[in-house]
Every structure is written in C-alpha cells, then in structure tokens.
C-alpha cells in the first residue's frame, strides 16, 4: 500500500518536536529587512526608494527576466533605506529595510477567513496572478512557481504532484499547514491543475502524518481528480525526482526536468500560497516557520512575515539556549548553518533549527574504508566517494562523466559515512565547477 | 637444412615487405612540424604550469611560432630573459615587460580581524566561500585554508602559522597566476615586482562601507580617499569603498602610505624613512613584515 522511491535513501530519526503545535503569529518587529534575492534566478529590481510609504502587499521589488520573482512588502511603514544586509547566503546582499508603522494592508487583499471555492479565471490569468504575487517554491529551493507552470514547448504536463512529504527531520511547518489549511490546499491544487491543464493530481504524504492523511482523504472526495497517496517514511522522499518515482513510478532522465516525464511538482506551502494569491489577492508576504531543537524551550510553528529577523522567532520560542552550537536555516539534512541571528526570514525559510554545541561539531574525517555505504544510500544512483575524490583533485572531466551534476545535495552520503568524510562538501564544490564549465562550453 | 633456409628466406622477405610498407606509410602520413617549436620548447622552463594561458610549454611554443607578433605572449616563469632568447631565434622582437609577482591583499590577522564564528567543514577555501563569508565579519578577506598553497607548483606560497595568512616567497614566485585563479575571494593579484622588489599596494579587498569594514577589521580600507588626495600621479582610484593603486602609474613616492588611517597601504622592501620615522611607528612595523 505505502509507496516509496526505488533506490537509495536513509531513515534519520524524525525528531518532530513541534508536531501538532498550532501555528502562532508573532508580533511584527519595529524594522524588517526584505532581501531582494529570495529566489533562484535574477534578484529583483527595487521599485521603491528611501522615504516611500508602503502597505502590506505593496510591490517593492520587480522581477527581472524570465526566472525571477516579484517581492512585496510584508509590513506597512516607511522605506528606511535600500542597503546590504547579511542574508541566508552568508553574504551581504541588497535588501529593502522598512520601518514598521501600524499594520495597514493594500485594499485589494481579502483578509477574511472565508473559503472561496469558485474561480472564474482562465489558465493564463491564474499563471499571471501567481507570477504577480511573487510565489516561489516554498519547500526550500525557491524556484519561481509561474515558470514551472509554463512547460517548455514540446513537453506536456500530465499529472500534478503536490509535495506534502516533509521528509526533513525536525520540520513540521508543512505538516501543521496541511492540518490547518486542508481545504485551502485542496482548492489551491485545483487551481494549479487548471493552470497546467491536467485532470489528475496526487498529494504525496509520508505515513508519519496519519492525521493529515485522514483529514485529506476525507475531504478529497469532493475535489475531482485529486488522490491522496500515503508514502513510506524515507529521506529524501521530498526531492522532486524521488517523489515522482515514488508516486508514478517514472524516472526523470539525467539532466532533464520533471516535465520530461509529464510531471510537475509543487510543495504544499506553495499550493497554499497559490490559493491565497488567486482567491484572496494576497501576495507572498508570510510563511510558516518551524523553530525547533532539543534545547529549545518551546518548539513551535510560527506564521512569520518575510523579513523578520531570526532572533524574533527564536525569542518567541523561548530564546536562544545557553549551549547553542549551531543555528541552521532549514532542516538538519539540507539546511544551512548561519553565523548571525539577525538574518531575515525569506520565502524559502522552512525552519530554524538550533543544535546544541555538543552535537554541532563535525567529527574529524578519517580515511575511506571503501564500505560503499554512500553508494548504497545515494538516491540518484551515483558513486559519492568517487565524486568526492574527483572533486578534491579537480578531475572535472571524469566528474562530469560520472554525472556529478545529477547530485541533489540531499546529504545522505555524508550522513551515512562511517568515516565521517565530508562527501557532500566536495561534491557540491565539484558540481558547481562542472556546471560552470558546461555553461562556458555552451557559449 | 633446406627447411631452415626456406624459413630464413621467407622471414627475410616478410621483413623487407613490412619495412617497405612502414616506410611508405611513414612518408605518406608524415607530420611536418616546424623544428622551431622543438627548439623553443627546449628553452622554455618546462614547468607546464599554464601561466601563459596555453596548455603546457609545447602549446606556448607552437603559439609563439605561429603568431606574427609576440605582443600578447609571455612566459611568466621564464621571464624577459627567456622571451628575448625566443625572439632571437624567431627574428621577432619581444615587448619589454616588467617582472610580476603575486601579492596577497589581506592583512586580516587574528589580532586585526576578530573571529566571530567557527567553520568546521572540509578544509578548502572554495567550499567555505560557497557556504558563507568566513569566520570573521569581513566577508572579503582571506579564509586561510590554503587553496593558493595547493595550487602553487613552485612551492612559493605558504600560510604563515602566526598570522594564518599566505605569504609569497619572492625568490620562488614565477607569477604564473595559479594562486590568483585558485583564490575564491580574489585576494591575490599579480603586480609589478618593482625596482629592488619595492612595491606599494592596498592590502585589503573589503568593499563594504567604511564603518562596517572598520568594525570587522582594524586594517581594512575604509575608502576615505585620503590616499587619493595625496597621490600626485593619479595612480589611486576608489571604487566600491576600496582604494586601488595602479602599478603602471605608481612612482613609488610613498606619500599615500603614512596618510592611511587604517594602515592598509603597504610598502615593501623600502629603506627606512629618514624624516617622520620617529613620528609614527607604523613604518617600523611594516619594515619587519
């Protein structure tokens, strides 16, 4: 009954400490910094200047180019300046800094909780609205959603896959969102089906979220074409290619996009944002963030405006524990450690994980014992130990031949390595180099 | 006896026939290569470092033979001397170039630049740089993990264990540029070695605004433009809050050095200053560096 992907994968301890905790809103701080590069692709162009008054939902950054996204103000107030602030990339990048005054929303936004089921918009109008609302993939990759909804010529979407897997340990933001906004997500799915012109949608949910599966199964019957599929607990099932394999049994070829097998994958967070954008005219200005960790006083799920500093969320969860060793933006497997607590929440911040100092330190790498555990767990069927060595010694041509660019950076190899080798660190380096070389060759 | 004779004769015939075929094939597919290439390759240092931009010394030799002028071709390892020799063989003229040397433009020692976070990932600058700005608040400075050291084929750059910054060995550096390419932060630059190895350069690449840069590192360039004002030769430019000294225009007058409020302009291998030496002690420090 339960499905899963066919090769590789691991099963780390789930540690869902904040599971079942109702989503809470936090007070808006006095100042927010909204980064202009919150998505994959070109950073947005600021359309406001110092001293401008903005409301919640006012456009502040315009998308430039095809792969880019709009950015809206998440608060009302005055633009203090456009300056460089440290964001999750670990570098100073441009951001719009707004001094908060009150909480005044744009008039077009429908703030009521009423469920709107009907949608008279055409396929193109839905996509345009999604693009205008600045929606990006909220599972963490932050790929602009409207781009995914416009399959390149020669390809056709056959099935929409909604990703409710949340296979990352600790994170519960999607779980709680699915629990509280079930109907909205189902309507959002219908909207996405219309945008893609497909009649079939599958919502994949891991079996550790039985409450969500039950609730969805009960409600889905009134939404034609939508099927709920419980999945085995296995990491990285939330990866696009793994989820497609698990749900429809098709394998995306090396170097191709999911659309090559007729599938489009969207995260549940994105689906909810689509519902709000299309039915309520609400641009993407807030998201659910899980603040968690063993030592955290009150692990919780927070609805946070974009641009709020991590510190405000951590304070809400009971403050930074004394023995904090590492603060991770995202989950423990694919998240990224950050060096400052005043980093703003962006569209891709799914969680803030606080790891105690005793657990945070990496172990010293030892020699490879050639046990091939990394080969066994790689969900892409690669040979991580070989790729690491090739990257370490800069043998880019062989790395390319061994499909280094197929790596999804899930970290299963580093997790499983008994010799604590930094496999992913080197593979990521090599992947970047090889991709740059391939790009240079194309031009 | 007869059998032996037949075997010898037969082998002889086969041998002769094969030799003829080999000779004819050899003649037919002969690659005519300019003997000059071989000759020039012998003059070249044979390091195959790629500093000239060609794949190995033979690549450079064939390029220099085929090219009309020698203007854009230079072997950094062999230097002017080698280029002159090549020019004599080819009957061309080698443009006069000045010897260059790798310069590390960061002085962010532990005292100057306090550590604010700990990186414990794989010990490679490129990996750390992809993750974040580095262990200090200066996101432009040296990470100190030695990608440049690994890249150097001439054993000319080493991390100083005291400062944790790379230092270039002037005698060994050939200015091949391998370290320049290896550094993910673009800190290392090839600059003119200068007469008697005397050089002046801004030892900082921080492009942040003054207060942010100064807070992160005591010796950061804050883009105050004081050096720009004293320079009589128009050699200094300030872009993105960072001063840069053009080594083609700089006449090594050293006027910019004492005016720098953060001591980020370095002078190397100069004799001690006569006047003002007692006034500020920073030159004393620099001499020892």
Image (cartoon, coloured by chain):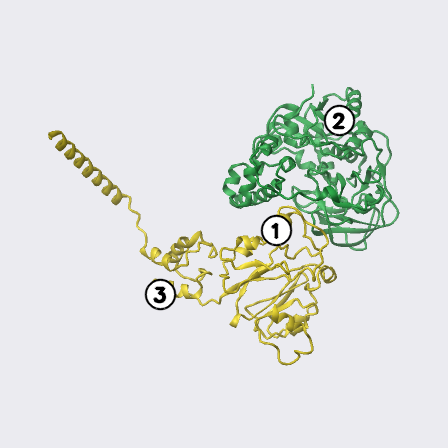
Chain colours: A green, B yellow
Residue for badge 1: B125
Confirm whether residue A38 shows in the render: no
Residue for badge 3: B88
Task: Tell me the chain of label 3.
Answer: B
Q: In the image, is residue B142 above or below residue A26?
A: below
> Residue B29 appears at what percent x and percent y?
29, 44
In the image, is B248 to the left or to the right of A30?
A: left
Disc on the earlier residue, 1 or 3:
3
> Residue B285 appears at what percent x and percent y?
65, 70
Q: Closest to the observer: A173 or A33?
A: A173
Q: In the image, is residue B287 above or below residue B25?
A: below
Q: Quadrant of the C terminus of chain B?
A: bottom right
Q: Are marks 1 and 2 on the same chain?
A: no
Q: In the image, is residue B75 above or below residue A9?
A: below
Quadrant assignment, res A133 = top right
Quadrant assignment, res A282 = top right
Measure how far apart labels 3 and 2 are at the Cα level: 79 Å
**Element under disc 3:** helix
In the image, is A258 to the left or to the right of B5?
A: right
Residue for badge 2: A208
| Structural crowding at the residue carrying mark 2, measured as other residues with C-alpha within 10 Å and reported as few (<14), some (14–19) or many (≥20) | some
Task: Tell me the chain of label 1.
Answer: B
Confirm whether residue A140 shows in the render: yes
**Element under disc 2:** loop
Task: Tell me the chain of label 2.
Answer: A
Judge depth for marks 1 and 3 and give the one in front: 1
* Residue at x 65%, y 32% (from the top left corner): A240
**Element under disc 1:** helix
């Amino acid at each position: 009954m339960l499905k899963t992907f066919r090769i590789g994968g691991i099963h780390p301890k789930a540690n869902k400490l904040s599971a079942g905790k109702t989503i809470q809103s936090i007070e808006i701080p006095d100042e927010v910094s909204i980064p202009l590069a919150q998505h994959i692709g070109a950073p947005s162009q600021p359309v406001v200047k110092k001293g401008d008054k903005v409301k919640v939902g006012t456009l502040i950054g315009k998308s430039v180019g095809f792969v880019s996204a709009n950015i809206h103000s998440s608060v009302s107030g005055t633009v203090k300046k456009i300056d460089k602030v440290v964001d999750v990339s670990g570098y100073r990048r441009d951001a719009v800094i707004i001094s908060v005054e009150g909480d005044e929303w744009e008039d077009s936004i429908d703030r009521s909780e009423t469920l709107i089921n009907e949608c008279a918009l055409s396929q193109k109008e839905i996509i345009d609205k999604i693009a205008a609302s600045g929606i990006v993939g909220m599972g963490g990759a932050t790929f602009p959603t409207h781009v995914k909804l416009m399959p390149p010529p020669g390809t056709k979407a056959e099935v929409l896959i909604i990703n409710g897997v949340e296979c990352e340990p600790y994170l519960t933001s999607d779980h709680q969102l699915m629990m509280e906004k079930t109907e909205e997500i189902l309507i959002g799915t219908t909207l996405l089906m219309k945008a893609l012109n497909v009649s079939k949608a599958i919502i994949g949910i891991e079996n550790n979220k039985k409450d969500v599966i039950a609730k969805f199964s009960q409600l889905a019957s009134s939404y034609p074409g939508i099927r709920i599929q419980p999945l085995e607990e296995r990491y990285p099932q939330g990866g696009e290619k793994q989820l497609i394999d698990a749900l429809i049994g098709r394998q995306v070829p090396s170097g191709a996009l999911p659309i090559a097998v007729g599938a489009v994958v969207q995260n549940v967070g994105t689906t909810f944002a689509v519902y709000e954008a299309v039915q309520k005219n609400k641009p993407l200005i807030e998201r659910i963030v899980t603040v968690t960790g063993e030592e955290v006083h009150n692990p919780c799920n927070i609805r946070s405006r974009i641009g709020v500093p991590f510190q405000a969320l951590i304070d809400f969860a009971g403050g930074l524990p004394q023995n904090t060793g590492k603060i991770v933006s995202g989950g423990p497997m694919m998240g990224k450690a950050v060096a400052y607590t005043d980093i703003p929440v962006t569209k891709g911040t799914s969680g803030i994980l606080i790891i105690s100092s005793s657990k945070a330190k990496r172990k010293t790498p030892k020699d490879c014992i050639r046990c091939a555990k990394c080969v066994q767990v790689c969900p892409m069927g690669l040979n991580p130990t070989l790729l690491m060595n090739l990257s370490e010694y800069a043998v880019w041509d062989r790395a390319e031949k061994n499909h280094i660019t197929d790596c999804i950076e899930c970290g299963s190899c580093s997790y499983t390595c008994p010799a604590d080798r930094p496999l992913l660190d080197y593979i990521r380096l090599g992947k970047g180099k090889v991709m740059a070389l391939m790009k240079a060759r194309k031009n | 006896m007869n059998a032996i004779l037949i075997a010898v004769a037969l082998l002889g015939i086969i041998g002769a026939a094969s030799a003829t075929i080999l000779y004819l094939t050899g003649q037919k597919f002969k690659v005519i290569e300019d003997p000059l290439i071989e000759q020039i390759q012998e003059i070249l240092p044979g390091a195959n470092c790629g500093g000239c931009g060609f794949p190995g010394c033979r690549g450079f030799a064939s390029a220099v033979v085929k090219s009309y002028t020698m203007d854009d071709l230079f072997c950094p390892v062999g230097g002017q001397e080698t280029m002159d020799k090549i020019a004599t063989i080819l009957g061309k003229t080698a443009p006069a170039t000045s010897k260059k040397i790798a310069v590390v433009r960061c002085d962010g020692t532990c005292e100057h630049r306090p550590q604010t976070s700990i990186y414990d990932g794989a010990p490679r600058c490129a990996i750390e740089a992809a993750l974040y700005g580095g262990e200090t608040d200066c996101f432009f400075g040296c990470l100190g993990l030695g990608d440049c050291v690994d890249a150097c084929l001439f054993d000319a750059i080493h991390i100083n264990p005291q400062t944790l910054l790379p230092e270039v060995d002037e005698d060994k550096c050939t200015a091949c540029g391998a370290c320049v390419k290896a550094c993910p932060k673009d800190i290392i630059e090839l600059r003119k070695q200068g007469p008697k190895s005397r050089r002046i350069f801004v030892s900082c690449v921080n492009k942040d605004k003054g207060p942010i840069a100064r807070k992160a590192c005591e010796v950061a360039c804050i883009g105050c433009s004081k050096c720009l004002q004293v320079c009589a030769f128009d050699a200094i430019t300030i872009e993105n809050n960072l001063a840069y000294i053009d080594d083609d225009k700089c006449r090594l007058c050293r006027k910019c050095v004492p005016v720098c409020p953060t001591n980020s302009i370095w002078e190397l291998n100069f004799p001690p200053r006569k006047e003002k030496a007692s006034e500020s002690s920073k030159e004393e420090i620099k001499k020892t560096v």
